[in-house]
Amino acid sequence: MPGSTMPVLNADQTAALLPFGPLCRILADTARDYAAGRITAPERQVLPLPLDGVLLSMPATASDIAIHKLVNVCPANGARGLPTIHGVVSLFDAATGAPLMVLDGPTVTGRRTAAVSLLAIQTLAPQPVSHVALIGAGKQTASHIEALAALHPGLRVDVHARSLDAAAAFVARQGETGLDLRPAYGPVDAAAQVVIALTTSRSPVYDEQPRPDRLLIGVGAFKPEMAEFGAVPVLGSAVFVDDPAGGRHEAGDLIQAGFDWTKVHSLADALDGAAPDAPRLFKSVGCAAWDLAAARCALAQRG
């Protein structure tokens, strides 16, 4: 309650308040609010830190709550044995401005991003999904595995890494997931119905001809110089972007392919059934509105 001692939650406590089922439902409602102008979420401010690090400031406001996500992304931390991302999401009552709660920033980012991918699968996959391929073996891949396990138990999930040994080591670290989790390397299995790219590659890791029976989801490339999908699948697909405004500046796959932004569809379009009868590519760039959705979920779960 406003005025009471504000809880500051760690990663495990934050995750417990963001179960994927409720989070997906609240994200869908929030996406419609955002599209209708009921949420204000300006483009994130990016400030430089040493060694190619950045500080990201992402506020958002709605009629019920306001949030501010402040995270630091420091690529050099891997060599130090430290997490790449540190930060917090602060929650406030919209009417009074009183602080309500502080959530762990990396946990919010990982879970709401994976939940957006789940929404894309629910709304854009051309058929019930039994086989997914993940390209990449980092934190976002782990978050997506947890999300898929929560809502699609028993699903076959191939994890592609830079080598088969690296993929096998990553899969082993995941422990028991309830998924049919398999290490992979090289071309994506022809039977995969969904391909989710989760890398920070600066050159395409997937450039196959688009297929009407396969949904492509791009998550990792969040800067203009990054690209996970090549021009062939981008220009041959109906393209959906979770946040079209932010995507124009951040969706490197689309920018490098010369995508015509007059043809873009939003996440809200997908939720409302506006999916053309064509191969589909969903690009996730993220925005503070999705962090606000996570905050709504956390408050609802806390009661």
Image (cartoon, rainbow, N blue to C red):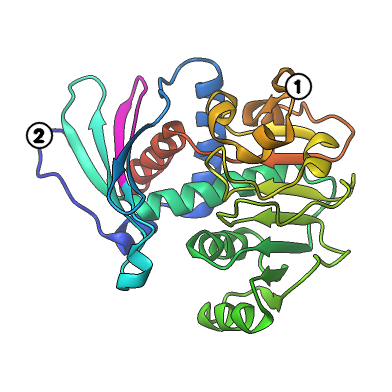
Does residue 243 sit above or below 227 in this rendering?
Answer: above
Task: Please give the name of the residue rendered at 24% of the width and 55% of the height, measured from the top-left corner.
Answer: 9
Q: Quadrant of the N terminus?
A: top left
Tell me the kind of residue under disc 1: Lys
Tell me the kind of residue under disc 2: Gly
Q: Is residue 303 visible?
A: no
Query: Closer to the camera, 250 or 216?
Result: 250
Task: Please give the name of the residue rendered at 87% of the width and 64% of the height, measured from the top-left corner.
Answer: 191
Magenta highlight: main SS: strand
| Residue at the spot of label 1 | 263
| Residue at the spot of label 2 | 3
> How many residues crowd around disc 1 within 10 Å: few (fewer than 14), some, or many (20 or more)?
few
Query: Closer to the camera, 56 or 16?
Result: 56
Q: Which mark is residue 205?
A: none
The kind of secondary structure element at disc 2 is loop
Query: Closer to the camera, 285 or 74?
Result: 74
Give, as a single range, the part of the protein colored magenta: 57-71
Does residue 100 sit above or below 201 in this rendering?
Answer: above
* Furthest residue in direction front, as rendered: 51
